[in-house]
Amino acid sequence: MSEPQPNGPVLVVGTGLIGTSIGLALRSRGVQVHLADTDGDRLAAAVARGAGTDARPDDVSLVVVAVPPAALGESITAALAAWPTAVVCDVGSIKALPLEQVTAGGADTSRYVGSHPMAGSERSGPQAADAALFSGRAWAVTPHPDSASDAIDAVRALADSCDASVVEMSPAEHDAAVARVSHLPYVVSVLAAAQLLPAPASHLALSGQGLRDVTRVAGSDPELWQQILVGNAAQLRLLLADLRDDIDGLIAALPGERSGAESFELLDRGRRGTRLIPGKHGAPWTERSVISVQVLDRPGELARLLADAGQSGVNVEDLRIDHDPARCVGIVEVVVHVDAAESFARWLESSGWSVHK
Amino acid sequence: MSEPQPNGPVLVVGTGLIGTSIGLALRSRGVQVHLADTDGDRLAAAVARGAGTDARPDDVSLVVVAVPPAALGESITAALAAWPTAVVCDVGSIKALPLEQVTAGGADTSRYVGSHPMAGSERSGPQAADAALFSGRAWAVTPHPDSASDAIDAVRALADSCDASVVEMSPAEHDAAVARVSHLPYVVSVLAAAQLLPAPASHLALSGQGLRDVTRVAGSDPELWQQILVGNAAQLRLLLADLRDDIDGLIAALPGERSGAESFELLDRGRRGTRLIPGKHGAPWTERSVISVQVLDRPGELARLLADAGQSGVNVEDLRIDHDPARCVGIVEVVVHVDAAESFARWLESSGWSVHK
């Protein structure tokens, strides 16, 4: 089965992690790729990785704008002007503002379709790029009312060529969606992590997996995130106002003794919210059980555990590692479907593991 | 080497997850354990698990109060009165308020020492209990100025018997610490998760690992958490006020265009905060690299990956699974020390895995 792919030379503008990875994915399918970047060193690194050539093309069928959020509008406008017959798309984290900027510039927006591959932002640069970066990830394609249907098809084909799953929605819908499922979660992660700065080391010794989970995304590039938050300010403002109301409600509900129903209501809303996050393969949320297993912290132990787990025939849905702060002991939390938990735990115990549910 | 353990019969009051697990841990070391609970069914379940006997003891050397946070003060006071020569400790998530309540009741507090094992709260009930629940976890022991030294020793011995790592601090210090490293992270997780309730399914389709990480702890029992937050209201209020200030700062810094330095400052504080969380075995934070590997979503694949990883000789520091929303493809993120990343990725590739960094 041959999948659709761009049917002519592609120009990738911006050779960071995302642009270079797209180049690598297209090259692996034999598509001709030209690369451009204002930073000559970065461009050279992307060329050296095999993501494409830095020779200026005579003509291109598709321009992929892969620049930081703050530069999107300008770069898309320039690409539409420079390549008057090409389809132009971008792969930025925000979609409404760049479209506004491009439209305001008077460009022919029928050839422009926004998109956004949902790939990680913790890594950066052409050195970190890989052809498989988007494999199995969602890729939002966000046509606007003036987008031509062949332009939309070309961008869908790009996502397909990168082995991603297309999710089509409007630019405004996209921005509302990522404000909720990505930008606000990043902000609350930052809020919690920032509160650690005044903590003495003895207090941090009580850190557990909950803190690590909550603060993980706060460790990613603040400069990139600043551009994302600023670019999605309108959507984010609405959520931040709600967030502040919820905090005010919680503060008001906190007495010196047992509280009323108000704070509980927020906590319950939170738990219900976690049930809405799609599970594996977009399936509805299902109840899962956590089996905790003790492993020695040395190479191969985790593999031995999972080999034993694999023999049980039970599918491991998730796996988390928590480490003892003071000794070489690791607790591995293996998440399985609730119906399989009992037999799975017994299987591991019979294989000699120290298990608790 | 024999470790210290309680040198006489122990009474555990409250046979939920924590109390029953303590009973099981002590029984596995041959300590005589008596169990008590106001709920006869729960008590019977704990006895059936082998955590101890429900016969009323003639005398006990140690009483472990393992009741919900809101009932701690009353239960500790009752235990001190009922067992006039025993050491009494509790294992609740808050420490200053129960001590206040016990002191206000006029009890002999020299025999009371608070404590708090840092074990998970996502599971509950005697059915979920296990002798190994505390193994390798931190266990805060929180003496107050009137605590007798032999009482402190008895509680340290209890933690040792449960194979936990003792971290000693005052009750006030403990409450300040957990407000920051546990209660506030839970609150922000709830805030983010609660915002998902109005989201249409198409928006949730863009959910990624960041959202799952941030909201995981919001899925745990809201009633228990309400008691914890209420019991630590004074410490939490301070942090929530700071949180609101940070949100106000972020809202103020969000214009329709590029922002000033204020919002950036918060994001940078967040990233620096993540660096303070102790790494493995309490070691300082070190730079780690994420290697993403594609695996088929079927039993045994993860084991095969880790077996191959184990042969590389590189220690897997963390492992996370993200699933394609639409297809049976899983991306496994393997976290290794930054210095080992390059050779580790090459090793996996040479073993036939599709890898990107």
Image (tube, coloured by chain):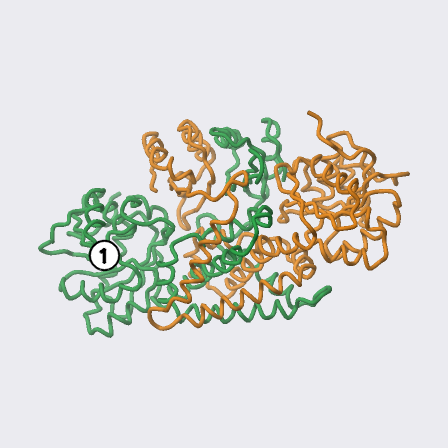
Chain colours: A green, B orange
| Coordinates of residue B36 in the picture (x, y in percent) | 82, 44
Is disc 1 placed on a helix, strand or loop?
Answer: strand
Q: Residue furthest top?
A: B1
Please give the chain letter of the residue carrying mark 1. Answer: A
* Residue B84 vertical position relative to residue B257 in the rendered view, above or below: above
Quadrant housing residue A226: bottom left
A177 relative to A150 in the view: left or right: right
Quarter holding the C terminus of chain A is: top right
Q: Residue furthest right?
A: B58
Q: Residues within 10 Å of mark 1 (few under 14, many from 20)?
A: many
Q: Nearer the viewer, residue B171 or A135?
A: B171
| Coordinates of residue B319 in the picture (x, y in percent) | 46, 40
The amino acid beneath tag 1 is Val
Residue behind mark 1 = A64
* Residue B137 vertical position relative to residue B190 in the rendered view, above or below: above
A182 relative to B67 in the view: left or right: left
Quadrant housing residue A179: bottom left
Q: Residue at x 20, y 55 (%)?
A: A37
